[in-house]
Image: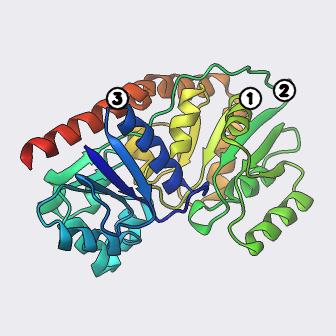
Amino acid sequence: MKICMVTPAPRGSRKGNRITAVRWGRILAGLGHRVVIAERFEGQRCDVLIALHALRSADSIRRYRETRPDAPLIVTLTGTDLYGDIHTSAEARHSLEVADRIVVLHRLAYLELPPHLHARVWVVYQSVPDLVLPVSRRKGWFDVCVMGHLREVKDPFRTALAARLLPPESHVQIWHLGSALSEDMAQSARREMAENPRYRWLGERSHGKAMRLLARCRLLSLTSVLEGGANAVSEAIAVGVPVIASRIAGSMGLLGEDYPGYFPVGDTPALAQLLGRCEREPTFLDELTARCRELRRLFEPGLERERWQELLRELGESH
């Protein structure tokens, strides 16, 4: 098939939507389809439209449905869709109503959708290829990685604030990867570095450099207020780094509801306690590592490829 994939993130963007679109484009091309990635649908000839973001791609979705009322339409949901826009925006809700399938990135996402749409939900876990990276962890330090752009929804400084509460004998060091999406955020990061010797903001790095840094750390800390299914989780699991995370549906849908490495959203003392436990109790860190290892199969490239292949086959047979 010829597939048009629409994402609001422009070419060259390092935002998650664009990275996801490019990865999916490669997967679909590998399955023998012809894929065009665009910022909007403007009447391009295609057999199916895949639209990332129910609200920000709403114009493209509406235009496609008006001109191709019977053609297959897939809408994929981000965290801001799931936990914000589809509850407040009529445009976002319209995108869901006209979609043939609704792709989500974790298994609990359907809980945010009205029951009559549950049958259209299709879970696609974001995959990470097998990576063989040199691991030379610093002796005498407990390095913790934070991966994510500096945005309010990521609660980006929560791990740094928790590190301030650790006792003087702690060897926790926070390494934060991600660009500041506002000057205020950049100033906050620089101020935190100046005041907090346990925190270092590295800004944006290439994917390869980011993965090498992640692999050298003992832990990934994910503090988001909401997530649609963070790729950082699958990346950490792929390189054998255990995860601690805020107790949100987007993380529980990947790690499991009974995963032992959660803390309440925004609870700095609870996160500090969790960091300290990971550093002081090797058996607890080993438990997190083992649990993450068991989840590796969910993020294998073969599974993501199979999910897309099955979805497109179903749509092709039903249209």
Residue at 35% over, 70% down: 42
Q: What is the basis of the colouring in this image?
A: rainbow
Tell me the mark number nearer the camera, choosing from 3 and 1. 3
Separation of residues labelled 3 and 1 (CA atoms):
27 Å
Give the labeled residue for mark 3.
Answer: 303
Q: Position of residue 298 (x, y in %)?
A: 39, 30
- Distance from disc 3 to disc 2, alpha carbons, whole Å, reads 34 Å
Q: Quadrant of residue 223?
A: bottom right
Near mark 3 (Cα within 10 A), the count class, few <14, some 14-19 or many ≥20, is: some
Please determine whether, in this image, residue 252 is positioned above or below residue 180: above
**Secondary structure beneath label 3:** helix
Left or right: 86 in relation to 294: left
Residue located 40% across and 51% down the image:
36
Say which residue appears at 78% left-offset and 67% top-offset. 186
Viewer-closest of 18 and 217: 18
| 156 lies above or below 173 | below
Residue 150 place in picture, x, y as percent: 67, 62
Residue 47 at what x, y percent from top left? 22, 52
Q: Is residue 29 left or right of residue 209?
A: left
Which residue was labeled with disc 1? 216
**Residue for badge 2:** 138
Where residue 260 appears, x then y in whole percent?
A: 49, 37
Nearest to the observer: residue 216 or residue 218: 216
Q: Quadrant of the N terminus?
A: top left
Q: Which mark is residue 128?
A: none
Q: Earlier in the sequence, mark 3 or mark 2?
A: 2
Give, as a three-letter code, the residue at label 2: Arg
Answer with the quarter of the image where residue 116 lies. Answer: bottom left
Q: Examine the rendered structure and indicate whether residue 105 appears above or below residue 152.
A: above
